């Protein structure tokens, strides 16, 4: 098994991927090397002969992986990517949630359909190619570097892992994209053209496969290296990418490799999983935070306003999302046999509902939520900092966070890949490749059973199973940023989102004895009607890039 040789002078207990490059270099480089020559004056060959500097540069490259949580530009926020494009903030642009916030760029432009080549808050073209350039730079300098062979092999594998993710991100956002395999020379034509998206996904497969060959497995990853790529992470991300590419057999094969490794298991407690500070058995790839050197602002931004001194409640689940949760018997609330009581709408629902959404009477941080309209302390529309739907999010919220928790002080880890997604990726890919065989049922039922939900009924058709998978992804992966991309790749955005005004729920009264509620469903009409055209399945190439390179063609409709 590949071993990793550490610098003797390097001291850290966990890999905090979000450290800025200068800080990482400062704490990671061998002290003797720093004494020999200033970092800004050493040659490339000297730099890449030093393990500490190479590792520091690798950690800088990792910064181009998704951060997940919002950070609001604090000094300890991860550079390289805009976190507002991920997690629950991204789901504000779907049927899952709405926001009242004016600072969330994605909501202000995406929901009303204002995406243009000059105005796209979720544009990552420049950031992806910056990451690719850095990856190619590292790889080119490692060729002749005088380093321990095992150390070099692992670094190359990790670089290929991050590089593969950048190309996957380009493919899912823009479709066709230029493939730049190595550092370009001045003699080359730098005005590259876009390569077909099928070739991009093939290259992604090549990179992740190469990475997996030389990465350590989860079983051989020490606790001090949690947050770095593993074989299972490379297989899992490749499985996700090939699902987007509609290479279903390959996607199923890759996801099954993760499942068969036995190195990851589903967490027992769904709610507690999202309070983890790293190292959970379900997490396959995660970004770690400590709230000091590296933190995020999820609690400050998302906690109900009554638990905050300001801000709060920037993501409000819709009534449509709440209605999509099954009863504990596995039936939809629209099924007459489900036992659903519209006067007690939150009883006997899928346990993931209670772990994801805050609603009238839900116990949270020492008291029940009071959303009774209009005077409850958590009532919708009470102030500009209260929910606009009558619901708040519970998922990810740290119930031990102090009242005045600030930006950059939250430390829940961000799981960009976890086993539940792999199981659902496998179920979808296998269903598309061969139909709903026993392995499809087994994969999706593992996810359902963890939440206490019963197995799916036997005998489903392929299309019926697809509908179940769509539902399960919406519920299990809610507020993790998947719904936004799923609707695009399924070409369901127009059907689900276009010309829609979503709703909230006012609780007008609650009977103290029976617990029955008087409810009023209302349209959240102070938000713009959602606009979604088929062209939005792909983002536009930034106009600035088109102007610099006439060989780049624009996506249709822009």
Image: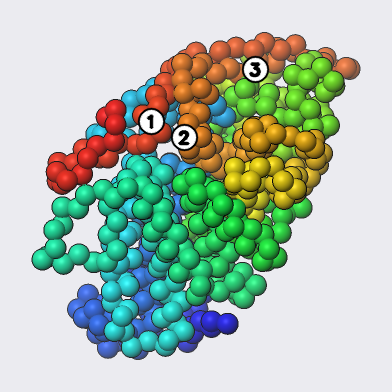
Q: Position of residue 476 (x, y in %)?
A: 66, 41
Q: Is residue 152 above or below residue 16?
A: below
Position of residue 54 measured from the top left corner of the image (x, y, whole percent): 36, 76
Residue neighbourhood size for the residue with mark 3, other residues' Cα within 10 Å, grouped as few (<14), some (14–19), many (≥20) = many
Q: Residue at x 72, y 24 (%)?
A: 360
Q: Is residue 88 left or right of residue 77?
A: right
Q: Nearer the viewer, residue 77 or 211?
A: 211
Question: Which residue corresponds to mark 3?
Answer: 505
Could you say where residue 18 lies in the image, as x and y percent from the top left? 44, 59
What's the residue at 29%, 50% (across, down)? 195
Q: Which residue is located at x 60 percent, y 53 percent?
A: 252
Residue 374 vs residue 551, the one in the foreground: 551
Q: Secondary structure at mark 1?
A: helix
For marks 2 and 3 on the same chain, the one whose residue lies earlier in the sequence: 2
Q: Going by the picture, which residue comes out furthest to the right?
A: 513
How crowded pointer 1 is (Cα within 10 Å; few <14, some 14-19, many 20+) is rated as many
**Which sits earlier in the primary sequence, circle 1 or circle 2?**
2
Location of mark 1 (residue) = 536
Q: Are marks 1 and 3 in contact (CB under 8 Å)?
A: no
Judged left or right of residue 33, residue 217 is right
Marks 1 and 2, how far apart at CA: 8 Å
Q: Residues within 10 Å of mark 2 (few under 14, many from 20)?
A: some
Name the residue beneath numbered marker 2: 488
Question: Do callouts 1 and 2 mark residues in contact (Cβ within 8 Å)?
Answer: yes
Residue 531: name its quadrant.
top left
């Amino acid at each position: 098994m590949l071993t990793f040789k550490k610098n003797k002078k390097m001291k850290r207990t966990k890999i905090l991927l979000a450290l800025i490059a200068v800080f990482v270099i400062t704490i990671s480089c061998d002290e003797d090397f720093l004494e020999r020559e200033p970092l800004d004056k050493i040659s490339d060959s000297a730099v890449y002969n030093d393990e500490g500097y190479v590792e520091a540069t690798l950690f800088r490259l990792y910064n181009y992986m998704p951060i997940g949580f919002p950070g609001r530009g604090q000094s300890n926020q991860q550079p390289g990517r805009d976190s507002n494009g991920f997690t629950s903030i991204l789901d504000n642009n779907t049927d899952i949630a709405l926001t009242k916030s004016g600072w969330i760029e994605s909501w202000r432009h995406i929901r009303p359909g204002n995406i243009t080549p000059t105005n796209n808050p979720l544009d990552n073209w420049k950031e992806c190619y910056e990451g690719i350039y850095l990856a190619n730079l590292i790889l080119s300098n490692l060729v002749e570097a005088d380093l321990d062979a095992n150390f070099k092999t692992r670094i190359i594998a990790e670089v290929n892992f991050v590089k593969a993710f950048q190309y996957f991100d380009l493919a899912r956002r823009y479709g066709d994209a230029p493939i730049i395999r190595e550092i370009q020379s001045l003699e080359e034509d730098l005005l590259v053209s876009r390569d077909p998206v099928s070739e991009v996904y093939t290259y992604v497969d090549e990179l992740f496969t190469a990475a997996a060959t030389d990465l350590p497995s989860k079983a051989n990853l020490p606790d001090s290296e949690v947050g770095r790529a593993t074989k299972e992470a490379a297989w899992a991300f490749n499985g996700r990418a090939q699902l987007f590419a509609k290479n279903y057999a390959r996607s199923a094969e890759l996801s099954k490799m993760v499942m068969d490794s036995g190195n990851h298991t589903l967490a027992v407690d769904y709610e507690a999983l999202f309070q983890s500070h790293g190292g959970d058995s379900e997490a396959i790839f995660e970004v770690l935070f400590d709230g000091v050197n590296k933190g995020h602002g999820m609690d400050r931004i998302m906690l109900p306003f009554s638990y905050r001194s300001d801000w709060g409640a920037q993501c409000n689940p819709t009534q449509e999302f709440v209605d999509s949760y099954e009863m504990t018997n596995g039936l939809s609330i629209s099924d007459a046999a489900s036992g659903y009581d519209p006067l007690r709408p939150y009883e006997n629902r899928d346990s993931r509902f209670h772990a994801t959404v805050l609603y009238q009477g839900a116990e949270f941080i020492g008291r029940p939520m009071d959303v009774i309209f209009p005077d409850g302390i958590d009532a919708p529309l009470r102030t500009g900092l209260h929910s606009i739907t009558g619901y708040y999010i519970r998922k990810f919220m740290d119930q031990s966070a102090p009242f005045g928790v600030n930006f950059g002080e939250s430390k829940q880890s961000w799981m960009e890949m976890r086993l539940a997604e792999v199981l659902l990726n496998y179920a979808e890919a296998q269903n598309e490749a061969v139909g709903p065989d026993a392995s499809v049922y087994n994969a999706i039922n593992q996810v359902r059973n963890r939440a206490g939900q019963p197995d799916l009924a036997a005998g489903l058709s392929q299309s019926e199973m697809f509908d179940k998978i769509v539902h399960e992804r919406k519920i299990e992966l809610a507020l993790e940023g998947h719904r936004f991309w799923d609707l695009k790749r399924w070409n369901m955005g127009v059907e689900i989102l276009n010309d829609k005004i979503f709703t909230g729920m006012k609780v007008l009264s609650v009977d103290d004895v029976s617990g029955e509620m008087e409810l009023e469903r209302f349209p959240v009409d102070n938000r713009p009607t959602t606009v979604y055209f088929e062209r939005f399945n792909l983002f536009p190439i930034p106009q600035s890039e088109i102007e610099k390179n006439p060989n780049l063609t624009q996506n249709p409709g822009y």
